[in-house]
Amino acid sequence: MNYANITGWGKALPPAVLTNDDLATFLDTDDQWITSRTGMKERRISNVSVSELAYVACAKALACAGKTADDVDLIVFGSCTFDELCPNAASNVQRLLGATNAACMDLNTACTSGMYSLTAATAMIRSGVVNSALIIGAEVISPLMDWTNRDVAVLFGDGAAALYLEPDENETGVITESLGCFGESREILSIEGWGAKYRDPKRTLCDINWDFHGQDIFKRAVEGMTKGCLSTLEKSGLTNEDIDLVVPHQANLRIIKTLGKRLNLDSDKVFINIHKYGNMSAATALVALVEAIEEGRVKPGSKVLIPAFGGGLTWSSHLILWGDRCTGLSEIDIEVPASDKTGLEIIQQLLKH
């Protein structure tokens, strides 16, 4: 039986930064209020589309794996902020890469989309449907954000990450995972005005309202990620002491710390980068994994646990047994284009509209 080894990884972060102090220029808030409640200090605001961010991340992942676009059999694009619904966004990434051999599919489970994409691609490689895959977690949330709503405007940022997977006879990649959803609570995290349901004479499509029940989301997020982690560990026959690194979805520092207490995790084993990027939804966990690799926190043979949750309310937990390589085989000279505006200037322009 083949496993799906992760042999390439890459991230794409917009150059424009939006700090807590920037937010305080148009919201009733300040750095201390945001930091104490979320752990966030700044986030990135994209000057390009989500497909373009995904393309940069994928190009880096291919270079890291020592592969070309011709080697890609499948692209799975996880997001909830696709440029368009038809044609799908993965086909645009295929076009930008020149990956003409690749099948393309989009996947939306909100913040867990990148991790669900990893499950889908892993299963298709292990079953022999495809021989390789690029999986993407990417979001450009900023154009759809209600920047007058302090409860949500301080939380989110833009970004992308990608992984390249290929078959391996050795046990590696995703070893066990658990997926689930609290569908009965789906209304506590919803974005009204975003979808065909709102094609109504009384309301303009994309007249966005974020319905965000923070305390309820907190409880369900901790519950879902705890449940996922315990299930995944039980399936694998491991305990929390066997795990080398936990890379949780970075939605709120309080949620991460509460999860750590529930699972009795050593804080040194928990990777955190929420202060730099905020919540990038589908991109969050994958960007954190890429940064953990870059910082030397992931080593050959590491057991990495990745719990996540998102709108729906979906939840997931993946146990990855890392392969024998933690450095890229090559690099590519490609980055997100420079922005002619600061993060604050981009938001000010959005506010005018």
Image (cartoon, helix red, strand yellow):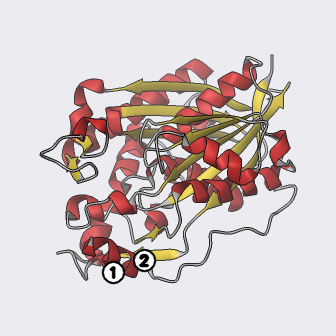
Query: Who's the residue at 81% across and 47% down the image?
Result: 69
Work out whether mark 1 precedes mark 2 in sequence or the reverse, and give the earlier one.
1
From the viewer's perspective, tell me whether residue 201 is left or right of residue 298.
left
Q: Which residue is mark 1?
A: 22
- Per the image, label 2 sits on a secondary structure element best described as helix
Residue at 49 percent across and 39 percent down: it is 86
Q: Residue 174: percent from the left, percent from the top?
A: 66, 31
Q: Nearer the viewer, residue 305 or 278?
A: 278
Mark 2 crowdedness (10 Å alpha carbons): few <14, some 14-19, many ≥20: many
Residue 297 visible? The answer is no
Residue ranking furthest to the front: 201
Question: Is 268 situated left or right of 345 in this image?
Answer: right
Image-based side of 52 in relation to 230, left or right: right
Residue at 38%, 81% (x, y): give it: 345
Q: CA distance from mark 1 to mark 2?
A: 8 Å
Q: Which residue is at 53% across, 33% downward?
A: 116
Q: Are marks 1 and 2 in contact (CB under 8 Å)?
A: yes
- Is residue 227 visible to the viewer in this orientation of the structure? yes
Q: Is residue 153 above or below residue 169?
A: below
User: Which one is nearer the viewer's eye here, 340 or 157?
Assistant: 340
The percent position of residue 33, horizontal first and vertical second, equals 24, 71
Looking at this view, is 240 or 213 the one in front?
213
Mark count: 2
Disc 1 is placed on an element classified as helix
Q: Classify 108 as above or below 286.
A: above
Work out which quarter of the rendered image holds the C terminus and state it.
Answer: bottom left
Q: Which mark is residue 343?
A: 2
Q: In the image, what residue type sits under mark 1?
A: Asp
User: Left or right: 223 with respect to 288?
Assistant: left
